[in-house]
């Protein structure tokens, strides 16, 4: 009788171990697959961003101001904190509020002019910006978690490209060089 | 031995296939009269080894994806540098550096917004 009980106990232990291990393994595998998928998508979007940024920067019809804005966005969105704040802003509708800002309207006007004369080039700018935002959002876990809520809202924003550019330039970290008195530097 | 439909349900689920492949023979051996505790220990140990191998493989995939991103970022940075982003103007070049160390040399920023 005790042998039967012992066998049943062993079987129960095996069954419980199997279920728990299966559950933990499946959860871990799902998390990893999701993260790897996000990273691969971020890499694809980044490649798209680089391709269209190159096309835009090489084109003689692109204005120097738009080129500078695109390069600033590209640089700022490499920052983890900036990506996190951008997705936070998008999810909380801060970017929507920026759509009517004066700087947004100015950028949008410049883009509209470009769209009339060089529609393909304006599309390059559009793709480069959207791909940069998507890549930045998916690259880090914190912003990737907000991606689902933030990205559709960003895409539905009026004057989308201009609003995103205006938002991203506000995320720019402080100046690379601070203006300090020369004497202070010499003393330090 | 296995409940009907198990094989069909396992298709495309490698973790579950391994779990069944390990535990089904263990259960069969137990039913045939083999000692239960060593078998249980072996089955759990086999699952542990499988878990470690799978985790390593997943980590490798993650690192490879990160590497792809880093490579593309390097291309983006080269492109920006070629077109003058972050290049110092003549006036800025004479300003003192904000930090005593790790000051930007080329004016090019890295992924954390600091100088590389």
Image (cartoon, coloured by chain):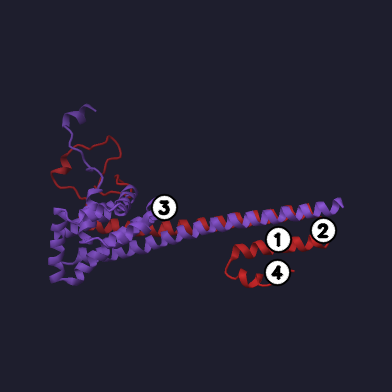
Chain colours: A purple, B red
* Residue ID at (75%, 60%): B26
In this view, the residue in front, B68 or A157, is A157
* Residue ID at (22%, 58%): A70
Vertical comparison of A12 with B100: above or below: below
Dot in front, 4 or 3: 4
Q: Quadrant of residue B68?
A: bottom left
Disc 3: CA contacts within 10 A as few (<14), some (14-19) or many (>=20): some
N-term-proximal mark, 1 vs 4: 4
Q: CA distance from mark 2 to mark 4?
A: 22 Å
Disc 1 is attached to a residue of which chain?
B
Is the C terminus of chain A in the top left, top right, bottom left or bottom right quadrant?
top left
Disc 1: CA contacts within 10 A as few (<14), some (14-19) or many (>=20): many
The disc placed on residue B3 is 4
Q: Is residue B114 left or right of residue A2?
A: left
Dot in front, 1 or 4: 4
Secondary element under disc 1, as helix, strand or loop, is: helix
In this view, the residue in front, A16 or A170, is A16
């Amino acid at each position: 009788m005790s042998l039967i009980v012992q066998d049943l106990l062993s079987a129960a232990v095996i069954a419980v171990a199997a279920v728990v291990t299966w559950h933990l393994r499946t959860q871990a595998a799902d998390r990893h697959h999701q993260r790897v998928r996000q990273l691969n998508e971020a890499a694809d979007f980044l490649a798209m961003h680089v391709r269209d940024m190159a096309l835009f920067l090489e084109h003689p019809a692109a204005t120097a101001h738009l080129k500078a804005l695109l390069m600033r966005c590209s640089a700022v969105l490499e920052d983890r904190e900036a990506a996190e704040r951008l997705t936070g802003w998008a999810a909380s509708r801060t970017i929507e509020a920026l759509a009517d800002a004066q700087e947004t309207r100015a950028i949008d006007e410049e883009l509209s002019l470009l769209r009339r004369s060089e529609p393909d080039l304006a599309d390059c700018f559009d793709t480069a910006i959207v791909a940069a935002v998507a890549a930045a959002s998916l690259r880090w876990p914190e912003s990737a978690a907000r991606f689902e809520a933030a990205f559709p809202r960003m895409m539905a924003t009026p004057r989308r490209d201009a609003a995103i550019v205006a938002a991203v330039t506000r995320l720019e970290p402080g100046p690379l060089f601070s203006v300090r008195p020369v004497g202070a530097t010499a003393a330090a | 031995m296995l409940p009907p439909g198990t094989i069909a349900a396992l298709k495309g689920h490698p973790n579950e296939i391994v779990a069944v492949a390990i535990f089904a023979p263990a259960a069969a051996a137990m039913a045939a009269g083999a000692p239960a505790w060593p078998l249980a220990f072996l089955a759990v140990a086999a699952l542990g080894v499988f878990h470690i191998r799978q985790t390593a493989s997943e980590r490798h995939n993650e690192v490879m994806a990160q590497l792809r991103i880093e490579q593309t970022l390097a291309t983006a940075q080269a492109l920006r540098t070629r077109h003058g982003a972050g290049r110092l103007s003549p006036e800025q070049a004479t300003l003192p550096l904000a930090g005593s160390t790790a000051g930007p040399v080329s004016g090019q920023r890295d992924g954390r917004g600091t100088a590389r």
